[in-house]
Amino acid sequence: MERLRRTLRALLQRALIEHGHNPTALVDIIIESAAEPRLWLEFANGYRTSALLRPEDCFAFCETHGTWDLVSFRVALRREAQQLYLLMRSEQARERELRRTSLTEQMRRLGRGLAQSLRSRRVHGFAEADTAWFIDDYGSAAHERGMRLLKEKLSCEQLKQYERNAFFEVIGGKTGRRYRIRYGRSMNIDQLDKNGRRICGWCFFPRGNLVAGDVMLSQKVALELFEPEALKVANKIW
């Protein structure tokens, strides 16, 4: 009984990993009779996954539920799987909410630090930076860590944009304007019109010798949470 339950959990977990952001309903359970019987789970979007079905596991399940024919066995197994799936989806939703809350707080702290950096000192419209800022960091370990962090904090759509075009779009938290952040550490922000055409460019970045991924993440957070403060100290580029 318990081993069959673990098999169900493993198959359901596989489905949640494949479709975690958009979990779909479990619609059927199929028993495949063969030299090595298999247990198949089928979902509303057509996704199917399977595992070997051991006779001793079936016997223990049937003994517990009093189901000694294939039809009643499938019905009881489907009921068990649906209850387990409901519990697992609920747990997943709670974990996602906890991660989202934690991420929001991290982004707010990062944004506040960036806003303080932007307000602290200006040099011709730029936040002050060391000369080392402009040294190419591509391929370094710090660069890889920065890019990995950036990608973790992008939304699914932003990540698709970046992986396809080496830029992603953000919406200004105050005005709702569209901005495009291109790969880079300065002069890499475009303001867009409603049709996606460039209106102008903006240049601002946090103080310190940061890699490109950290800079772009800071720019994203600043525009989403501190748009007026960021643009106030930025250079406008026509």
Image (spheres, grey):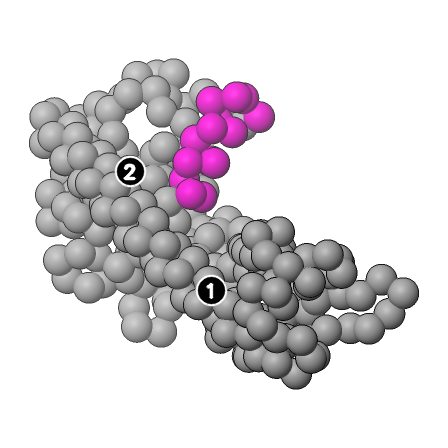
Instruction: Residue at the far right: name it.
Output: 35
- Confirm whether residue 199 shows in the render: no
Residue name at image x 51 percent, y 68 percent = 80
**Magenta region, residue range:** 139-152
Please rate how many residues cluster around mark 1, counting C-alpha atoms within 10 Å: few if below 14, some from 14 to 19, many from 20: many
Real-space CA distance between mark 2 and mark 1, rounded to the nearest whole angstrom: 38 Å
Q: Secondary structure at mark 2?
A: helix
Name the residue that disc number 2 marks: 218
Q: Chief secondary structure of the magenta span?
A: helix
* Above or below, 151 relative to 159: above
Q: Secondary structure at mark 1?
A: helix
* Above or below, 34 relative to 98: below
Picture coordinates of residue 24, whole percent (x, y): 49, 72
Q: In front here: 164 or 203? A: 164
Picture coordinates of residue 219, whole percent (x, y): 28, 42
Count of numbered tags? 2
* 10 part of magenta stretch: no
Name the residue that disc number 1 marks: 85
